[in-house]
Amino acid sequence: MNKKSVEIVVEESGWIVDVLARKCFEELCQQENLYEVSYSNSLASEGKDIYIHFIYLNAKIIRGAINIVYVTHVDRWFKAFRLVRLARENVYFVTMSEDTLKLVKKYTGVEGVFAQVPESIHFKSTQSNRKIHFGIFSLLYPDNRKGNDAIENFLAYSSSQNQNVEITVYGKGWENLLANFPKLKINYYNNDFDIELYTGLLKKCDYVIYFGNDEGAISILDASTLDLPIIAISQGYHSDIRLSRYSKLCQNSDDMLNTLIDIIDQVSVENTYNSWCNIIQDSVTGLNSSPVSLFRLMLIPFIKNKFLIKKNKKQNYGQND
């Protein structure tokens, strides 16, 4: 396979886009068997196979080559007009989010748009195997006063995400329920109360949770006193005490279950980085072969854009009308 010559063009140095462009440069340089990479802080030089322009507003397209244009926020109509004009020159777009990808497609009508959710610029990821640790500190009774059904639903969902969830249960009466979830990592303590063990277990939790429908849980009071995040139902003295940061009181067990599922889902998200090598390879296939009509310029004011900044009317304060 013949090497492709790639030039990264950044006309504005010293800005954060320059840092992102440098990361692109370093990434492609590691693929030395595929690409011969150069970097320009001025105008693009002629004769390259592929140009990656940071960013789209100042991009000067090189005819006869593949042009990939990096898109930051599209918050003004004139920027949308620029996107359509670039699309008419058969460029490919790279966005920083799925939201902007969808917006660029709406404005331009082209398919050659790639989302590249960026990796941390300054730090390497150390959270590939993140876990969330919940703690439940209470007895469990057969009369459902502790929210047994909701707890079972919570354990069932946690079990489906067992690689990312760890649960500590401290209290008697849980044996039968916990036996239904053998794949879930559960630390179960049903011994007599021990203040040192109890305190140590509390402090290991990311969240102390309580589903019960009663005057309130001592564990919630203790967790808030220790400034530990809690998630519980808004009832009894839960609503009266000072809650620690990141805590939430829910209206009912369904609301609480949804809150916990959202937290688990966020921990379970696996960030998939769309590499520059993949983007280039996909661009070579020619996804944007269909011509873009100027009619798309007329559609711009009618496309919903949540990033759009509207001009505020100037107001004169302190003056009599």
Image (cartoon, grey):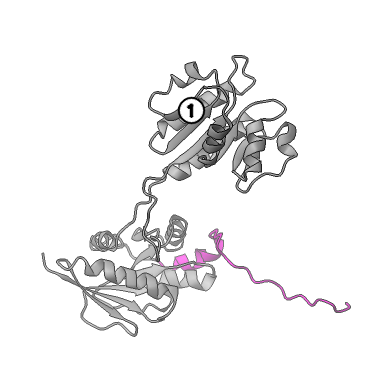
Question: Could you tell me if residue 84 is visible in this image?
Answer: yes
Q: Position of residue 240 (x, y in %)?
A: 75, 39
- Across and down, in percent, residue 230 comes to 60, 40
* Dot 1 alpha-carbon crowd within 10 angstroms: few under 14, some 14 to 19, many 20 or more: many
Above/below status of 255 relative to 97? above
Q: Nearer the viewer, residue 47 or 149?
A: 149
Mark 1: amino acid: Leu
Residue under the image location 40 percent in, 58 percent down: 117
Residue 90 visible (yes or no)? no
In the rendered structure, which segment of residues is drawn in magenta?
293-321
Residue 130 vertical placement versus 214 (above, below) = below
Quadrant position of the N terminus in the picture:
bottom left
- Specify the quadrant of the image occupied by residue 210: top right
Nearer-the-camera pick, 9 or 250: 250
- Give the x, y percent position of residue 155: 48, 28
Query: What residue is rendered at 22% in x and 66% in y?
Result: 30
Majority secondary structure in the magenta region: loop
Instruction: Indicate the position of residue 173 as horizontal and vertical percent values.
Output: 54, 17
Residue extending farthest top: 142
Query: Is 22 colored magenta in this rendering?
Result: no
**Residue designated by label 1:** 155
Side of 171 where 92 appears, left or right? left
- 313 lies left or right of 160: right
Q: What SS does tag 1 mark?
A: helix
- Residue furthest to the left: 1
Q: Is residue 229 placed above or below 114 in the rendered structure?
A: above
